[in-house]
Image (tube, rainbow, N blue to C red):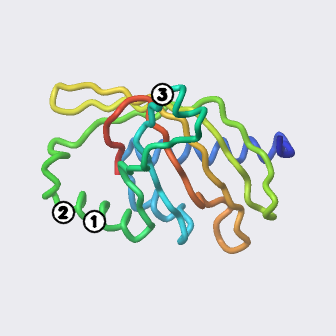
Amino acid sequence: MSAQVSLELHHRISQFLFHEASLLDDWKFRDWLAQLDEEIRYTMRTTVNAQTRDRRKGVQPPTTWIFNDTKDQLERRIARLETGMAWAEEPPSRTRHLISNCQVSETDIPNVFAVRMNYLLYRAQKERDETFYVWNAFRQSSPSGGRELALAGTGYRPGSSGHLLP
């Protein structure tokens, strides 16, 4: 197990995550995008349900992605939402991100931390409610220039299928 971080740093990273959730829930996608590292890979793989005998043999089905985006691709998604022509988001979804079980540990790279958390995403739109149970493992960096913290990479594992905004 990697070395744990101080309570102060854990608190700062947790607060960063809570702020990120608020930005997404409030549809402040440009502000959210500004927090992301330029080299971010924002990904969600499909859930793999391999048979026990296949897992023992090390057989893994091919990876398929729900999304596998760079910062530029995220910017294009946001620009599309801003046009008013993203019909799947008319009327806009109402979302609530609930974050828990945040674990932060050091990595071999200075000022880069491994973060794992669980979150629940509730989404309501067009008289339909959806709940996504997700765990998230990512790297959080503490860059020297400008920002105090930046999201450097993220990978989601859905507990149920569906898309996440943006």
Instruction: Residue 162 in the image: state x and y as whole percent.
Output: 31, 37
Question: How far apart are the two marked residues, 3 and 1, measured between alpha carbons?
Answer: 41 Å
* Residue type highlighted by circle 3: Gln
Q: Along the line of sight, which residue is nearer the eye, 51 or 154?
A: 51
Examine the rendered structure and indicate whether residue 122 appears above or below residue 27.
above
Residue under numbered circle 2: 83
Q: Nearer the viewer, mark 2 or mark 3?
A: 3
Examine the rendered structure and indicate whether residue 146 appears above or below residue 80.
below
In the shown orientation, is residue 82 left or right of residue 163? left
Residue under numbered circle 3: 51
Q: Residue at x 42, y 46 (%)?
A: 24
Instruction: Residue 62 in the image: state x and y as whole percent.
Output: 42, 49
* Residue type highlighted by circle 2: Thr
**Mark 2 or mark 3, earlier in chain:** 3
* Residue type highlighted by circle 1: Ala
Question: How far apart are the two marked residues, 2 and 3, measured between alpha carbons?
Answer: 44 Å
Quadrant of residue 30 within the rendered picture = bottom left
Q: Residue at x 68, y 74 (%)?
A: 145
Q: Nearer the viewer, mark 3 or mark 1?
A: 3
**Mark 3 or mark 1, earlier in chain:** 3
Q: Residue at x 38, y 44 (%)?
A: 26
Q: Along the line of sight, which residue is nearer the eye, 22 or 73?
A: 73
In the shown orientation, is residue 116 left or right of residue 7? left
Number of marks in picture: 3
Residue under numbered circle 1: 79
Identify the secondary structure beneath mark 3. loop
Examine the rendered structure and indicate whether residue 118 appears above or below residue 80.
above
Residue at the limit of the structure toward the bottom, as seen here = 145
Q: Which numbered disc covers residue 1?
A: none
Question: How far apart are the two marked residues, 1 and 2, measured between alpha carbons?
Answer: 7 Å
Identify the secondary structure beneath mark 2. loop
Instruction: Residue 109 in the image: state x and y as whole percent.
Output: 79, 63
